[in-house]
Image: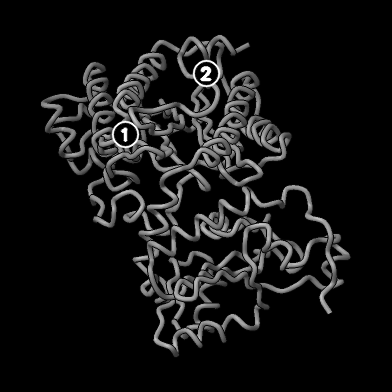
Amino acid sequence: MALKQTKIPSGKDTMFSANTYIERRKRLKRQIKSGLVLLLGNEEAPRSSDVDYCFRQDSTFLYFFGLDFSGLAGIIDIDENKDIIIGDELSIDHIVFMGDQPTLKEKSQLIGVKNTAPTSQLKNILSKATDSGRKIHFLPVYRPENKIKLFEMLSLPPARVNESASVELINAVVEQRSTKTREEIAEIEKAVNTSVDMHTAVIRMAKPGMLEAELAAEAHRVALAVNGDLSFPIILTINGQVLHNHLHDKKLKKGDMVLCDCGAEAPSHYVGDLTTTLPVDRKFTPRQRVVYSIVMTAYDASVAMLKPGVRFKDVHLTASMKIAEGMKELGLMKGNLDDAVAEGAHAMFFQCGLGHMMGLDPHDMEELGGSYVGYEGKPKSTMFGMKSLRMARELKPGFVMTVEPGVYFIPELMDLWKSQKKHMDFINYTKLEAYRNFGGIRNEEDYLITEKGYRRLGKHKPSTLKEIESLRS
């Protein structure tokens, strides 16, 4: 007998109305046309035998089914025009620890799904479809337990599961999720607003003698205080040249800069992603000001280009050229800068891509395959620097993008390229040595592509030299 569960725990309501999810699934059916779509939700991830990591539902499952619980799967039967939620009712043992909750059928009705089935029936549903010659569409899998499920249900070897993922479904999901609706944008802006508050708190709080960990803790506190959380592990470091530095064990000292790359995740799971660079002192040093201004020149030039029809690759190359021009003014680059950027010499200073899509994840949809999301299925460049560009395709209204140019002085890269005599016509290695211990600077903000141009999302983040210094005590 199924136990009656009467309450949804706080924060576990669906993101939007049932009609939103119904329309999303209808659109997917029109795109795929035939077969059966299987969307696997996530399971709890154990960190020890009796403790789990914080649960995070699969973003595509959330997008089409909106249920933020573990142990679920969703079926969109295109031929029979039927949607099914697969999962098990909670036992009394679950309820003792989790409290009363709606039944699976009641939860499913919230997202416009009338049909439910226990987990034990999923394999039979899939087998019946394949025996009838119907195609099972599923997405690339990034969680090992879901690879095992597909092995057990479809006899696909775990190492080869993703080779069998439906390219038709990938393209359909990317096309639909890429264009954000008004209600999605509203949720993203909630996350961005909290993200701005996180960064403002860090700018105000930083002082010589503090640990990076104290600032990271304050940023996390701001997100938690509004019933949110982090959209990704905080990057907060005095070693800004380490692009994904999640260590927080260094002590801030005079002359350092702090690079803070963090964002909030709203209860709806839509996210923000911002970066700020600030001085540990009350003001930037003269050298820091010059490099910071170069970064902001690249940022302003990039933002000015945002509009439908422009390839984001071209925006990236504009930022790359502005950085190269700034480095030449400092005497760190030389020669013909068009040739330098074409050959990738600027990547001594700007090693990563200018930005990426953002939505239910900071790097939105990239678990489906970066080439599908940012390159429309075309191959990426293999050139150092360019291969890190996540987004190259033409911009369209409704896209939400980060714009995040930076300048990074990486001693190991300096030594390697110098030893290889690489780009000797474009890089002045003698003068570059003086910047060995400079670190890195990045500014990142989030933008919506509109019908005619762009709109920065969320409230204003302090980003200019004057704005940041005005908040330093």
Residue at 55%, 14% in the rendered image: 281
Kindly identify which residue carries mark 2: 462
Determine whether the residue tagged by mark 1 lies in a helix, strand or loop. loop
Alpha carbon separation for disc pair 2 and 1 = 22 Å
Left or right: residue 150 versus residue 8 is: left
Quarter of the rendering containing residue 351: top left
Quadrant (top left/top right/bottom left/bottom right) for the C terminus: top right
* As drawn, 37 above or below 347: below
Left or right: residue 47 versus residue 163 is: right
> How far across and how far down the image is residue 144, in percent?
53, 70
Q: Is residue 182 visible?
A: yes
The answer to whether the residues at label 2 and label 1 have Cβ atoms under 8 Å apart is no
How packed is label 1: few (under 14 Cα within 10 Å), some, or many (20 or more)?
A: many
Residue at 51%, 74% in the rendered image: 147
Quarter of the rendering containing residue 320: top left
Q: Nearer the viewer, mark 2 or mark 1?
A: 2
Determine whether the residue tagged by mark 2 lies in a helix, strand or loop. loop
Q: Which amino acid type corresponds to the residue marked 1 in the rendered image? A: Phe
* As drawn, 142 above or below 251: below
Q: Nearer the viewer, residue 405 or 117?
A: 117
Query: Of callouts 2 and 1, which one flags the residue occurring earlier in the amino acid sequence?
Result: 1
Q: Is residue 235 visible?
A: no
Quadrant (top left/top right/bottom left/bottom right) for the N terminus: bottom right
Q: Which amino acid type corresponds to the residue marked 2 in the rendered image? A: Pro
How packed is label 2: few (under 14 Cα within 10 Å), some, or many (20 or more)?
A: some
Q: Which circle marks residue 210 in the picture?
A: none
Kindly identify which residue carries mark 1: 350
> How far across and how far down the image is residue 56, in percent?
62, 55
* As drawn, 333 above or below 400: above
Residue at 20%, 30% in the rendered image: 427
> How far across and how far down the image is residue 217, in percent?
68, 35
Left or right: residue 120 versus residue 339 is: right
